[in-house]
Image (cartoon, rainbow, N blue to C red):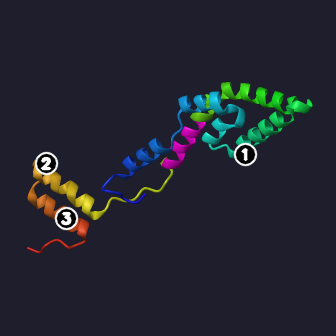
Amino acid sequence: MTNQGGLSADTQALMAFESNKKSAGVAYLLWFFTGGVGGHRFYMGRIGSAVTQLILAILGWTTVWFGVGLAFLIPLGIWLLIDVFTLGGMVAKHNSDLMARLNTMPRQAPSSADDLAKFAALRDSGAISSDEYEAEKRRILGRPADAI
């Protein structure tokens, strides 16, 4: 991850997780209001099965008047009933996979400026002396020690 606005890699990963995680509450609301057309599956990123549910609903409702529609609507209803019990697990798996993906992303090594700022803060707080700070500064910048 590139350093954006001075944020650490961990902070950036946490922000990415928070912005991409799925909510079980939202998933269940979508199941309740748009489940018949696969809305909850679109939300979960399961596009293939969402399109299948949408096609079953369209075929079922357009042919219900001919007596054929129940052949599409009954399997869809069973599928939606199963989804109500498995939706929480889908959300948990999505969030777990997202966290694993973010944890395996390469971390950017701290920059020299970040290291210098840490040592400057230690010097300013009195945790290290000015001489120790200068030695660390030379090490970070790759300069040889002064000859006495």
Secondary structure of the residue carrying numbered label 1: helix
N-terminal label among 1 and 2: 1
Residue type at mark 2: give it.
Ala
Q: Is residue 47 magenta?
A: no
Gap between marks 2 and 3, in whole Å? 15 Å
Q: Nearer the viewer, mark 1 or mark 3?
A: 1
Residue 124: percent from left, percent from top: 11, 52
Q: What number of labels is visible?
A: 3
Q: Which span is picked out in magenta?
A: 93-102
Nearer-N-terminus badge (1/3) = 1
Picture coordinates of residue 117, whole percent (x, y): 21, 57
Look at mark 2 in the image and give the residue it sits on.
Answer: 127
Q: Secondary structure at mark 3?
A: helix
Say which quarter of the image contains residue 64: top right
Q: Which residue is mark 3?
A: 137
Identify the residue shown where x is 33% and y is 52%: 7
Taking 18 as reference, is 52 left or right? Answer: right
Residue position marked by numbered label 1 in the rendering: 48
Is residue 96 covered in magenta? yes
Residue 84 versus residue 124 in the image, above or below: above
What is the number of the mark on residue 28?
Answer: none
Q: Quadrant of the C terminus?
A: bottom left
Q: Is residue 4 above or below residue 48?
A: below
